[in-house]
Amino acid sequence: MRELLESVADGSLSPTEAEAALNGYVTGEAGRFDAARRQRRGIPEAIYAEGKSAPQVVALAETALETTDRALITRISDEQFEALESTFADSAPDATLERYGSTVRVLGAEFEQPSLEATVGIVTAGTVDGPVADEAQVVCTDAGATVDRVDDIGVAALNRTLDQVDRLRDADTLIVAAGREGALPTVVAGLVDTPVIAVPVSSGYGHGGDGEAALAGLLQSCTVLSVVNIDAGFVAGAQATLIARAIDAARTDDGSR
């Protein structure tokens, strides 16, 4: 405690960093940021931008960057992203902003990219599933897993899926995103011996076209898989990250790394 106070007094530690070290979270006008989630859970807290004002997103991102040297932001709008760019150009010019559709990763100058000896395959049935897959990909990339992205192999032309079977089997775990009736994850899970995490996507026509048909179909899958909520790319990426971390630890322990 004394060392922490002395660090604040001599300016080597900010009050925000000290609060994070003491409580595990930081309280600001935009809410509380869980700075210790990665240490506690293996996955950093993400800032869900939808429904927040641009200043709120910026404030939370600044707190994340100050306490963890990175920020993950999901469902970001163009207006919010422009506010981030403008703010960090002045307050953190050495920070790097990476945007993947509606998902953003901000990296501080001192951020050290981790590395996991594990591969996550991320698969989409069609182009419309891309933004959800992007969200999952950012989470896995941030954790240090190798990501192998396979896009647009929906079952309407099954040869597109069968052409990629060997590649899918090489992954340590798979995230498969699909809308409409959600058939692709079920088909893939019947072809591989790796864990499959299915993400129903809110695309399609009429009844059930908001992702509910895909969700219902995947919950009734004959093949063994896990299902996250509709459009829950972050959750799928987090689950895959936990699997990748366990695989990495096992490979390190047995000396095969």
Image: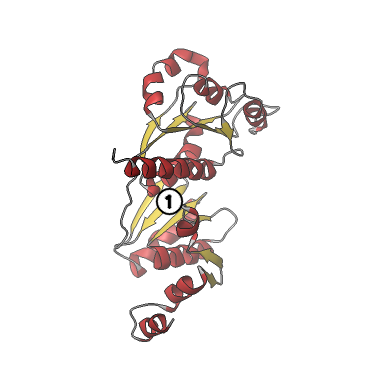
Q: Quadrant of the C terminus?
A: top left
Q: How many labels were placed on the picture? A: 1
x then y, percent, for residue 209 = 65, 29
Taking 110 as reference, is 153 above or below it? above
Taking 32 as reference, is 13 above or below it? below
Q: Is residue 75 left or right of residue 207?
A: left
Q: Is residue 5 visible?
A: yes
- Farthest-out residue, right: 207
Taking 113 as reference, is 57 above or below it? below
Q: Amino acid at mark 1?
A: Val
Q: Nearer the viewer, residue 85 or 232?
A: 232
Q: Is residue 101 visible?
A: no
Q: Is residue 11 left or right of residue 204?
A: left
Which residue was labeled with disc 1? Answer: 104
x then y, percent, for residue 104 = 43, 51
Q: Quadrant of the N terminus?
A: bottom left
x then y, percent, for residue 97 = 36, 55
Q: Nearer the viewer, residue 119 or 213?
A: 119
- Farthest-out residue, front: 254
x then y, percent, for residue 184 = 53, 23
